[in-house]
Image (spheres, helix red, strand yellow):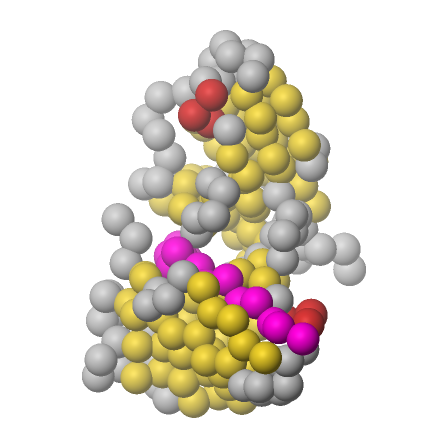
Amino acid sequence: GESVGLHLPTLSVQEGDNSIINCAYSNSASDYFIWYKQESGKGPQFIIDIRSNMDKRQGQRVTVLLNKTVKHLSLQIAATQPGDSAVYFCAETQGAQKLVFGQGTRLTINP
Amino acid sequence: NAGVMQNPRHLVRRRGQEARLRCSPMKGHSHVYWYRQLPEEGLKFMVYLQKENIIDESGMPKERFSAEFPKEGPSILRIQQVVRGDSAAYFCASSQNTRGGTEAFFGQGTRLTVV
């Protein structure tokens, strides 16, 4: 079965605020994690990834944090914009195998 | 460099017909994954293929479903004798290699509707 889950199915934030999307995973052997963004009617789009030998990685307006002790992953989006509205999925992989996806969190940006 | 190309984007089939979904990976990618997504749900892994080989088909139903990735041409996900429960979005992803984990790029999906 799938081993990645999310704490919150929906999240609403004000435009300009920061967003934090959380993800719990159960496979302690997972060594690679990815956050994807999926807009309506489209395929998942890669946002940022992190390997298990790191605990933080930053991109443009996004930061991923990995806490292996509690098996928790988060995606922080700074200064959210209307274009950030989408469903966000975390995914994990162990070694060279399949990506396992979580349920997803729908992020809504309020003007 | 074109991304992952899936066709058709939309496919309507009557119950009992066959559905063929095609996926052309990104140039230079030899690993292909197929996922299924129901509305308001996550992506469920179906099968992972390399050229001419099925590596992991643990997520694919044992009956009616098959997948291939020939030496030449796109990867094909085939669903025989479709039923209404097969209606879903089917996404294909490709990656260059998976040693140590590398990002997988997704196509826009094929939305299958069984009537």
Choose between A22 and B19: the one closer to the eye.
A22
Task: Inspect the magenta stretch and tell me whether residue A102 lies in it.
Answer: yes
Report the side of A64 relative to A81 (left or right): left
Image quadrant in which you'd find residue B46 = top left
In depth, the one of A14 and A93 nearer the eye is: A14
Image spot of residue B30 (x, y percent): 57, 52
In the picture, measured across the screen, residue B10 lies left or right of residue B64, that is right
Residue at image coords 22%, 80%: A70
Residue B42 seen: yes
State whether residue A46 is above or below residue B110. below
* Quarter of the image where the C terminus of chain B is located: top right
Furthest-top residue in view?
B16
Instruction: Tell me which residue sits at (76%, 55%) in the image.
Output: B2
Magenta segment? A96-111
Q: Residue at x 47, y 69 (%)?
A: A11
Tell me how many marks there are. 0
Quarter of the rendering containing residue B61: top left
Q: Identify the residue at horizontal 59%, vertical 79% (top origin).
A: A14
Q: Is residue A55 left or right of residue B70?
A: left
User: Does A14 appear above or below A91?
Assistant: below
Image height of B51 relative to B27, above or below: above
- In this rendering, position of residue B84 left or right of residue A8: right
Please tell me whether residue A100 belongs to the stretch shown in magenta: yes
* Residue B69 visible at all: no
Residue B1's image quarter? bottom right
Q: Position of residue A48 (x, y in %)?
A: 54, 76
